Amino acid sequence: MKRKYSQAFKAEMVKKMATAPTKSATEVAQETGVSQSTLSRWLREAGSIAGMRKRPEDRLAEEKLGMVLEAASLPEEELGAFLRRSGLREVDLDRWRTQMVQGLSAPKKCAHEKQVRELQHDLRFKEKALAEASALLVLKKKAHEIWGDADDDTARRNGR
């Protein structure tokens, strides 16, 4: 049988899990009598509400940078509590750190790639123009072989 809980009760439980990061959803479930899966679902649903936990991929770049810097300054024994409080895993911090390092080296690479693309575009344009000019020269030569010089034809008609 499915139990109905008021929005106020749900909000209180989510707040309890969000503000007491040292307690897991299982511990809160044992204290309150609400199933762990229900509490976890409420916490996930609340993650989209302003001021509540966010999914790691929904955070702004500035938030990610701040969290990476803060985590780097913490002693090892405080890192776990920080991760729980922030709703993160160590893997998230590692991924963000890698992205930041790549981002710092990317401008040189991006500028180089842009220049290569522009040069390739110019090369394709010039190759097409050269092919067109070559085709026109071949046509002109064939036309000359077939009909001869245009001046010769008009000279014969005029009786010269």
Image (cartoon, rainbow, N blue to C red):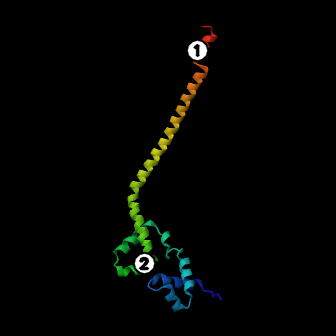
Task: Identify the secondary structure beneath mark 1.
Answer: helix
Q: Which mark is residue 152?
A: 1
Q: Which mark is residue 24?
A: none
Question: In the image, 88: left or right of 145?
Answer: left
Q: Camera-side residue: 115 or 63?
A: 115
Residue at horizontal 54 percent and vertical 82 percent from the top: 40
Q: List x then y, in percent, for residue 114.
A: 44, 50
Residue identified by numbered label 2: 83
Q: Earlier in the sequence, mark 2 or mark 1?
A: 2
Disc 2 residue crowd, few under 14, some 14–19, many 20+, Cα 10 Å: some
- The residue positioned 37% from the left and 71% from the top of the image is 69
Q: Quadrant of residue 70?
A: bottom left
Depth-wise, is mark 2 or mark 1 nearer the camera?
1
Reply above or below: 52 against 157: below
Identify the residue at horizontal 45%, vertical 83% (top origin). Answer: 21
In the rendered image, residue 131, in percent from the top left (x then y), is placed at 53, 35
- Left-right relation of 105 to 30: left
x then y, percent, for residue 12: 53, 85
Q: Secondary structure at mark 2?
A: helix
